[in-house]
Amino acid sequence: MQKNIHSSLHLIITNCISCQTEYQNYSTVKEDKKINTCANCNPAYKGKASTEIRIGKAEKFHRRQQKAQEKAKERIKKNMSRYWMIFSTISAPRQRIKKFFLSQVILNLLLKIILYMVEATFNQSSYQNFDFHLIDPSWNEFFQKQIKQKYFTNLLIQIEEEYKNHRCCPIKDNIFRLFQESSLQKIKVVILGQDPYHQIDVADGIAFSTQKPDYIPPTLENIFLELSKDLNCAPPTSSSLLPWVKEGVFLLNTALTVRLREPLSHLELWQEFIYSLIKYLKDYNNNLIWVFWGKKAKLIKEECEINDEVSLVSPHPSPFSAKFGFFGSRPFSKINNLLINSGRDPVNWLAIEKPKIA
């Protein structure tokens, strides 16, 4: 048995089970299963008329299927139009939401730009308040690196607040005076102390130094006494140590400011700045001679990994600790010996004036 099927109306070529003759018949699949005999052998066909009746029924079935398909297409079109209306009603709010969020993004961006401009203006005014334009040009690279870091801006803000709300030392113009008076290329020796003098009008921005007339602080007096014994000379009596700075001695404290009569009050504020400075000096010149006076300075030496071969460590020369190892440490002659052994000129420690010690 062979079958050729086209759409829902089937043209069937088959053999009659009674006479074995081939005949053609139009039928549906269901009808095909019931009829296996030709019109001559099956009286139900009643000749040609029966065949035409079956063909008519098949055509009606086919038309009904076409109408059903057309109705289905109409329903799809109606549903599509309905879906499009729903989508349009939903997409309109989406567009409004999108515009809203876009406007928020633009506003946030503008706000950030305004805040950045305000912060930049504030930073610029802060830098002007601290006279950074007076700093020796050799320090530009170092300070440019610090300005880019957030801690430095916070440091300036905190120092500004401290000077507004408390009496602090030294005067504001002298906070960075050491960087104004010293040239980076000329530094041969770094002496690290503790924090500035916390008495009125004593600190001048250079560690251990003072510009107060006819006054030598007790710590500086101990330094001069050790210098006189070390170099076998009369003790210097000038309280300004600026000549030592010009000789290449970088007189630095572990904090550049302090509250009046509150020692170590600003030590933590300056910690990151001092560590950054020590590391910068170490990388800039690995032939520097380092002198660390006091426990705080010794701790910085250890954390910054300063080589023992180029460093001297002793107690601080203050009246409270000088007798525990500063006296007799002979730092001045040792510094010069290290400089001479490395082929450099020694420091002229006697370059300062010699009035009488009070």
Image (tube, grey):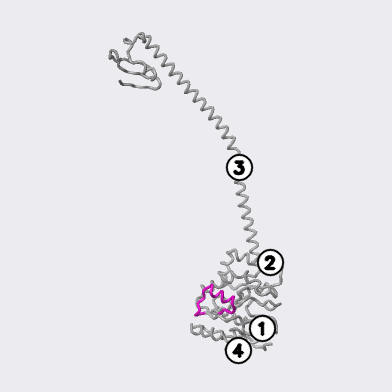
SS type, badge 4: helix
Mark 1 surroundings: few (<14), some (14-19) or many (≥20) residues within 10 A? some
Q: Secondary structure at mark 1?
A: helix
* Residue 117: % across, % down: 63, 58
Mark before the other along the chain sequence, 3 or 4: 3
Q: Are marks 3 and 4 in contact (CB under 8 Å)?
A: no
Residue 241 figure quarter: bottom right
Label 2–label 4 contact, CB within 8 A: no
Q: Quadrant of the C terminus?
A: bottom right
User: Reading the chain from its start, which is encountered first: label 2 or label 3?
Assistant: 3
Q: Quadrant of the N terminus?
A: top left
Instruction: Report if the CB atoms under discs 2 and 3 are less than 8 Å apart.
Output: no
Gap between marks 2 and 3 measured at Cα:
45 Å
Q: Which residue is mark 2?
A: 161
At mark 2, the secondary structure is: helix
Q: Mark 4 is on which residue type? A: Ser
Query: Residue 197: x percent and y percent?
Result: 66, 77
Residues under numbered marks 2 and 1 in contact, where contact means CB atoms less than 8 Å apart: no
Which contiguous range is marked in magenta? Answer: 291-310
Q: Amino acid at mark 1?
A: Pro
- Residue underneath mark 1: 218
Q: Is residue 294 magenta?
A: yes
User: What residue is rendered at 53% in x and 85% in y?
Assistant: 334
Which residue is painted at 39% across and 14% down in the image? 55
Rounded to the nearest whole Å, what is the CA distance between mark 2 and mark 4?
Answer: 42 Å
Q: Amino acid at mark 2?
A: Glu
Q: Earlier in the sequence, mark 2 or mark 4?
A: 2
Q: Which mark is residue 228?
A: 4
Instruction: Report x, y in % for residue 227.
Output: 60, 87
Whichever of callouts 1 and 4 sits on the residue coming sooner in the sequence is 1
